[in-house]
Amino acid sequence: MILYPAIDLKDGECVRVVHGDFATATVFNKDPADQARAWARAGFEWVHVVDLNGSVEGRAINDAAVKAILEAVSIPVQLGGGIRSLENVEGWIEAGVSRVILGTAAVRDPELVKTAAREWPEQIAVSVDVRQGKVAVQGWLEDSGLDALTVARQFEDAGVSALIVTDIDRDGALMGFNVETFGAIADAVSIPVIAAGGLATVEDIIKVRARKGAPIAGAVLGRALYAGTIQPAEALRAAA
């Protein structure tokens, strides 16, 4: 199971928000590249980066911070937030992003995702952001009216490398993983599932790994790392 420490970018800084509400933003590091280096030194194999401003605006806003992260670390980076076209995808892959995450575009233009997955095999992921059972888009500001399984199943056999499933109702709140939500999607599709939203302690990682059924391929660690409720070394041991 791969752990993905999160770097959420708002106004050029590394922040955490609760339930996607920008008004709750807490700045944890004014230098995102420095934070990426810290996660690499801690032993993580990937970094999960989201351009929060970009997710709302529909275009890259924190591109300078992303490029600084790419220059700062040699471990692979997956990036989401405001990526809405094949040109956007190509630009980030050429810049050094290892995996591009499509969320709003995946809901509004599934064919774009399928085309991208054919063009860049194993480098395209789909973000499935769930609030009260429905998938949210546009920086979590709008309800698509679709349920998570409907969105996920559209990409079976499309070559998508992962589904990053976020439980918005728990995101940033240290409430613990809703293992059943992630497990239901993992059991329903063959695409690897990365769980996000709510992870609070190492017990959440242990519970995810122990569940019966299809394995959860990975987990995103956010506020728990920044707040110190979970230490990198213990998280990595539990995941291994």
Image (spheres, helix red, strand yellow):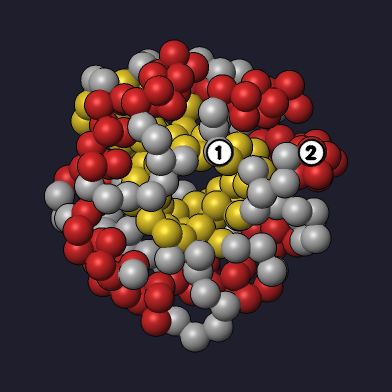
Outermost residue, front side: 74
Check residue 165 in the rendering and tell me which mark sits there, or answer none. Answer: none
The residue type indicated by label 2 comes to Glu
Disc 1: CA contacts within 10 A as few (<14), some (14-19) or many (>=20) = some
In which quarter of the view is residue 32 placed?
A: top left
Disc 2: CA contacts within 10 A as few (<14), some (14-19) or many (>=20) = some
The one of 97 and 105 positioned closer to us in this rendering: 97
Residue 127's spot in the image, x, y percent? 59, 46
Q: Which residue is mark 1?
A: 98
The one of 200 and 232 positioned closer to us in this rendering: 232
Q: Are the residues tagged 1 and 2 within 8 Å (C-beta)?
A: no
Q: Quadrant of the N terminus?
A: bottom left
Q: Is residue 5 visible?
A: yes
The one of 179 and 67 positioned closer to us in this rendering: 67
In which quarter of the view is residue 6 placed?
A: top left
Outermost residue, left side: 228
Residue 92's spot in the image, x, y percent? 60, 25
Q: Is residue 215 above or below residue 221?
A: below
Q: Is residue 59 above or below residue 41?
A: above
Residue 30's spot in the image, x, y percent? 24, 20
Q: Earlier in the sequence, mark 1 or mark 2?
A: 1
Residue at the image position 69 percent from the left and 26 percent from the top: 90
In which quarter of the view is residue 154 placed?
A: bottom right
Q: Is residue 143 visible?
A: no
SS class of the residue under badge 1?
loop
Check residue 119 in the rendering and tell me which mark sits there, or answer none. Answer: 2
The residue type indicated by label 1 comes to Ser
Residue at the image position 64 percent from the left and 43 percent from the top: 123
Residue at the image position 26 percent from the left and 61 percent from the top: 235
Q: Quadrant of the C terminus?
A: bottom left
